[in-house]
Image (cartoon, grey):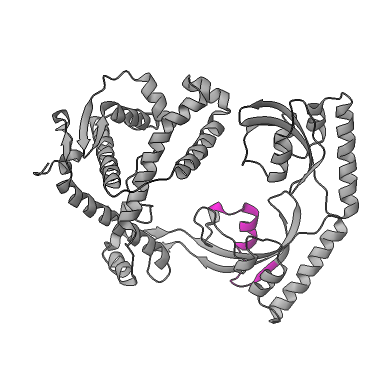
Amino acid sequence: MRKKNFFRFIALPVLACSILSSASAQSSKVIDQVVAVVGSKIILQSDIEKQYNQFILQGGERSSEGRCLIFDQLLLQKLLVNQAEVDSVVVSDAQVDGELEKRMRYYIRQIGSEQKLEEYFHTTIIQLKAELKDLIREQLTVQTMQGKITKEVTATPNDVRIYFENIPPDSVPYIDAEMEVAHIVRKPPVSDEEKKSVRAQLEEYRNRILAGEDFSVKAALYSKDAASSKKGGELGFFERGQMVPEFEAAAFNLKPGDVSPIVETKFGYHILQLIERRGDQINVRHILLQPKVSDKDLLKAVNFLDSLKKKIESGAISFDEAAEKFSDDEDTKNNGGLMINPETGTTHLSPDKMDRLLFFQVDSMQLNSIAGPLLMTTPEGKNAYRLVVLKNRSKPHKANLKDDYQKIQEVTLQEKQSKAMSDWVTRKKKSTYIHINDEYKYCESLKHWRTESN
């Protein structure tokens, strides 16, 4: 059991609120009834069916035990919500509205547009939001209660040691190879002459479009946004918060058919044309031109990094100091240049998740040796150069306290939080009225809810 759960996030039980569950409910004709009461809260047969249908849609096997496990989770959710009411735990309207908007944006991105979402569910966006709002409030209440129950739980060094020592030797997992890599980035500036030249070219395209030429043809021929140029510059529907601010501000001020003035963003220079507006969403097409860094300025960056590398290797300045003082990468310069793993938030990079070019550059390096200047492409699609140092490299190995303390501590904390939740549930079951319909007596996973006092 430990082997299966080790180093896997142990989420405290929270039922996910999915819009697909709502769709399943529409297609399932269930004669509804109350199947359980937890304090002042009820569970309906349809609640179980919605979650069960979603489980099947996600590839789960049809079984009576699947329904039982879903019922078990619903009972826990209602116990937490009931206690939140007793303890006056309140989730603010702002929290609910923020989470609702975030989820709606996700659903719309998945299905394509607000209109397609409405067509799929045969209802309006307003009605969908109303249906989801109470569900989201309940889910956030559950999360808040869980946080309240586990907020005092900690994992001391002694806890970590005991947890690790209790893992059977044949169940201690292997840890994948990881690297810690730092870099100092120099992004050569674009000359004013190049900027003026690009703006002039884009202004010419704009004038020709305003004179009647087809925007989509110009985008297909000249835009440097490879993904959208294939579609005549069309980006598809989006809403506020999905694009960079300068682009968004211009786009949402347009009327259908309008062509914007030149807009500058970190990606380059754009002109936009509004295709369609649907509620809070718009669809635009754009042409992107990117000023190029001159060979002369690229050479300056190479020479600068060459000189800096020699100073670091001579001990005149440390790599960390040089990163803070000279690197153009705002995300890493104040962290000694250490790159961050976006999935874990740590500086440990697994080779299979690294940029392939970077991996091949550092894979054969010695620890603390400096490579470069190396050519790189910035997130904005521009050429730059960098110095790279390999700070640490671990080989695949069996977990141990010396090398993997942080990971083991995280799992230990999760285990303790899970135990705290389990203990809390055991106590609350004794003081909370719980009734489950006899038709579910066959469920082994529900037996722990049937106490003598209930």
Residue 311: x percent and y percent?
A: 73, 78
- Residue 17 in sight: no
Task: Give 206 or 373, whichever is nearer the viewer.
Answer: 206
Tell me the magenta residue range.
353-371
Q: Residue at x 56, y 59 (%)?
A: 340
Q: Is 15 on the left or on the right of 369, as rendered?
A: left
* 72 lies left or right of 97: left
The quarter of the rendered structure image containing the C terminus is top left
Front residue of 369 and 23:
23
Q: Is residue 72 above or below residue 61?
A: below
Residue visible at 54% across and 54% down in the picture: 342
Q: Quadrant of residue 180?
A: bottom right
Residue 366 in the magenta stretch? The answer is yes
Which residue is located at x 30 percent, y 43 percent? 81
- Where is residue 303 shown, x and y percent of the image? 81, 68
Marker count (numbered): 0
- Residue 192 at x, y = what percent? 88, 54
Toward the bottom, the furthest residue is 315
Relative height, residue 35 to residue 405 (above, below): above
The spot of residue 109 in percent (x, y) is: 56, 33
Q: Quadrant of residue 418?
A: bottom left
On the picture, is 125 further left or further right than 89?
right
Going by the image, does 134 lie left or right of 84?
Answer: right
